Image: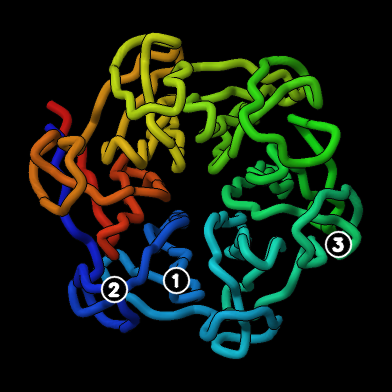
Amino acid sequence: MVIVSTFAGSGEEGFADGEGSAAQFFYPTGIAIDAAGTLYVADWENNRIRKVTTKGEVSTLAGGEEGFADGKGSVARFDHPHGIALDTAGNLYVADSFNNRIRKVSPNGEVSTLAGDGERSFADGKGSAAQLNEPNGLTIDATGNLYVADTWNARIRKITPDGEVTTFAGGVDDGYSEGDFADGQGRNARFYDPFDITIDAEGILYVADSGNQRIRKVTPDGVVTTLAGGNNEGKRSFADGKGSKARFFWPSGIAVDAAGNLYVADTDNQRIRKVTPDGVVTTLAGSGEKGFADGEGSAARFCRPRGIAIDAEGNLYVADGNHRIRKIAIKRP
């Protein structure tokens, strides 16, 4: 049994700290969870990083007005932050999408810039010598390396803890190139608007390759294959099934559990999907109709769900375009 409920957020767009439905978000996108079950949310239109306790108490860790500035708490500025990842020391890393930078947020809310010069372009290099093009998804490995879904550069980038940026997989001659798809190793692979990324215990990356309507798999040595999904020729398409028989429509959030199962926010299908390690796709929650409803499985409704995270007990948390954080509890026999 799968039960969808609302964990935090009133459903009205706006900004307010508070508990549960007293809090307000404005298009939350990225979401991460620590070992204690505390959530961290990239509140996209509010240009803030929010913190949500296990009791649903929402506070603001960093950010305020739209812009760019390093600093502590409300002094810091973001421009539509999207992806978010958490290291073992409690530091957050934020894909500050419209600033074309990767930001670091300490546990006490001190914001600094790890990589990117702010220009929407492409360059490998260290710190501000690197260039990104609307990065969206982030994940982190056991040694502290970040992997970034650099969306409009159509690449997966790797960033070391000291800010050295390289290209891990994907590549075109001039950066962004619309509509490319190819499996292969390293720069021979092609992505189309990769939007989110996650990593399993073996160091294998999984990418929500949104424009290609596929879930891609990337080994530690950069070999890219397709796990699930197929070409829908840009049309709305939905199908459960194995491998290329499955269909997604703009998947843009992805998380992996300890057993290697993937959970995908299938954004424009208004559903949460499950993908087994061998590529079998099923629908976990959502009716397919855009809207809002809590309830069991297919009775629930979402509005363009984006970020997704999983806690130690197997509960999912979804950044929902209904300006809410939703919880999905999977009740096992």
Q: Nearer the viewer, residue 266 or 319?
A: 266
The residue under label 2 is which amino acid type? Glu
Q: Dot 1, crowdedness within 10 Å: few (<14), some or many (≥20)?
A: many
Judged from the image, the secondary structure of the residue bearing numbered disc 3 is helix
Residue 135: percent from left, percent from top: 64, 52
At a point 41% along the width and 26% down the height, the residue shown is 261
Quarter-of-image position of residue 17: bottom left
Total of numbered circles in the picture? 3
Find the distance from the CA under tag 1 to the CA under tag 3. 26 Å
* Residue at figure coordinates x 37%, y 58% from the top left: 37
Between the residue at mark 2 and the residue at mark 3, the CA separation in whole angstroms equals: 35 Å
Q: Is residue 227 above or below residue 3?
A: above
Q: Which element type, helix, strand or loop, lies under badge 1?
A: loop
Query: In this image, 38 relative to 118: left or right?
Result: left
Extreme residue in the bottom direction? 75
Q: Is residue 155 visible?
A: no
- Please give the name of the residue rendered at 75% of the width and 58% of the height, measured from the top-left corner: 120
Residue wearing tag 2:
13
Between 17 and 299, the one lying in front of the other is: 299
Residue 162 left/right relative to 176? right
Q: Is residue 328 above or below residue 201?
A: below
Q: Give the number of the disc on residue 127.
A: 3
Residue type at mark 3 is Gly
State the image coordinates of residue 170 (x, y, percent, origin top left): 74, 30
Distance, label 2 to label 1, CA atoms, is: 9 Å
Residue in the image at 73% along x and 22% along y: 189
